[in-house]
Image (cartoon, rainbow, N blue to C red):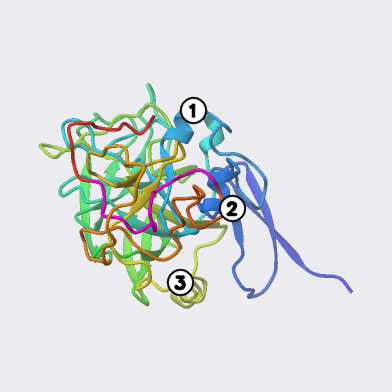
């Protein structure tokens, strides 16, 4: 018995789907979990097997840390600079970084950088000269999703900013969101799904849509916006990024994201440093943990999360790996700011 198929084309990218209404299926998937961090496969598409960032590069490793007490989610670009700006590692600038698709679902927990637009993804349109492609930046600023649009061959500062009025969860909670990059009217940010609601935005200025990349620019493109702080790479928790070939409906986004509870895992992110011996709170200066365990604390804002922290005697963190020794029972007081500042390369 045969099946009717339709071949879709997207600027040289082709995919096949059966005719008729079917459930959406991901064409690229990046769990961004502890298992992927341990196997050095954070940037490998689980569906195609393709690495979108060259495997085992030192810069890629230094930009990501596992989240303490959680198997799902990683921390991207974890430390402030000496000027208290978001840190940034150039993970992209490679043709391998290109992603294709018309919808994205992702879970994020943005960093606490008031005023800084943190790039969630960048959509590339018409090709320009001297790396001045048409592009639309989708970013998070003060928990609000905002966009920046620059026409092909425009000046760096010739950028149009749009406030969406869509705010992510606060109180250090994860946000499960869905983004549509296209509609019957054009390309850009057609709509956002968040908090069980689909918001039609129709921010679709792109003349065409070639590809996109997550969390940063794909090339050495530079974009400025009036007197605002630098538009920078995403800093914060990332998890479960999936790309879809077609734009999705609100109900489809709801089905795909309904399995996640954004009320779980509240609070500031702590990380397990692969070098061992360190439990660090993000966005603070840190120092090496002492060999002995500290006094136990609760789960308030000044204490690291308890739960699956491991014993300091065997050097595990509760996941069976030997990458970190946080000492004591695993719920010692968090490390206090000190004169020693750890860089993400440590």
Q: Disc 2 and disc 3: Cα gap in Å?
A: 19 Å
Q: Disc 1 and disc 2: Cα gap in Å?
A: 24 Å
Q: Is residue 2 above or below residue 78?
A: below
Magenta highlight on residue 160:
no
Position of 168 with respect to 94 (left or right) is left
Q: Position of residue 43 (x, y in %)?
A: 54, 43
Magenta highlight on residue 323:
yes
* Structural crowding at the residue carrying mark 2, measured as other residues with C-alpha within 10 Å and reported as few (<14), some (14–19) or many (≥20): many
* Structural crowding at the residue carrying mark 3, measured as other residues with C-alpha within 10 Å and reported as few (<14), some (14–19) or many (≥20): few
Residue with the mark numbered 2: 28
Front residue of this view, candidates 193 and 33: 33
Magenta span: predominant SS is: loop
Q: Position of residue 79 (x, y in %)?
A: 28, 39
Q: Earlier in the sequence, mark 1 or mark 3?
A: 1
Q: Are marks 2 and 3 in contact (CB under 8 Å)?
A: no
Secondary structure of the residue carrying tag 3 is loop
Q: Is residue 312 visible?
A: yes
Secondary structure of the residue carrying tag 2 is strand
Q: Name the residue: 45% across, 72% down.
A: 260
Q: Name the residue: 58% across, 40% down.
A: 40
Q: Earlier in the sequence, mark 1 or mark 2?
A: 2
Q: Which mark is residue 260?
A: 3
Q: Which residues are magenta?
A: 322-335
Depth check, mark 1 against mark 2: the one in front is: 1
Residue with the mark numbered 1: 58
Front residue of this view, candidates 288 and 260: 288
Q: Name the residue: 39% across, 64% down.
A: 177
């Amino acid at each position: 018995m045969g099946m009717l198929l339709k071949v879709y084309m997207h600027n040289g990218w082709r995919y096949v789907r059966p005719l008729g209404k079917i459930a959406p299926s991901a064409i690229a998937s990046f769990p961004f979990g502890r298992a992927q961090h341990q196997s050095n496969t954070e940037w490998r598409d689980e569906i195609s097997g393709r690495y979108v960032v060259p495997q085992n590069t030192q810069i890629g490793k230094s930009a990501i840390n596992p989240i303490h007490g959680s198997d799902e989610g990683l921390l991207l670009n974890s430390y402030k600079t000496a000027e208290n700006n978001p840190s940034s590692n150039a993970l992209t600038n490679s043709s391998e970084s290109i992603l294709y698709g018309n919808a994205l679902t992702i879970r994020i927990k943005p960093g606490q950088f008031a005023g800084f637009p943190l790039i969630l993804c960048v959509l590339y349109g018409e090709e320009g000269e001297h790396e001045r492609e048409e592009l639309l930046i989708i970013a998070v600023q003060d928990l609000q999703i905002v966009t920046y649009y620059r026409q092909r061959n425009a000046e760096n500062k010739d950028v149009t900013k749009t406030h969406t009025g869509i705010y992510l969860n606060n109180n250090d909670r994860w946000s499960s969101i869905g983004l549509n990059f296209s509609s019957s009217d054009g390309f850009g940010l057609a709509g956002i799904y968040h908090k069980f609601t689909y918001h039609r935005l129709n921010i679709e200025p792109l003349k065409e849509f070639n590809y996109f990349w997550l969390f940063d620019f794909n090339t050495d493109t530079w974009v400025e916006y009036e007197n605002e702080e630098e538009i920078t790479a995403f800093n914060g928790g990332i998890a479960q990024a999936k790309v879809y070939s077609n734009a999705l409906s609100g109900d489809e986004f709801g089905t795909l994201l309904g399995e996640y509870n954004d009320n779980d895992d509240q609070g500031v992110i702590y990380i397990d440093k692969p070098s061992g011996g360190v439990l660090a709170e993000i966005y603070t200066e840190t120092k090496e943990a002492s060999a002995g365990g500290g006094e136990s604390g609760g789960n308030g804002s000044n204490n690291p999360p308890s739960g699956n922290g491991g014993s300091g005697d065997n050097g595990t963190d509760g996941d069976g790996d030997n990458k970190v020794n946080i000492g004591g029972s695993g719920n010692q007081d968090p490390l206090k700011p000190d004169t020693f500042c750890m860089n993400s390369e440590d």
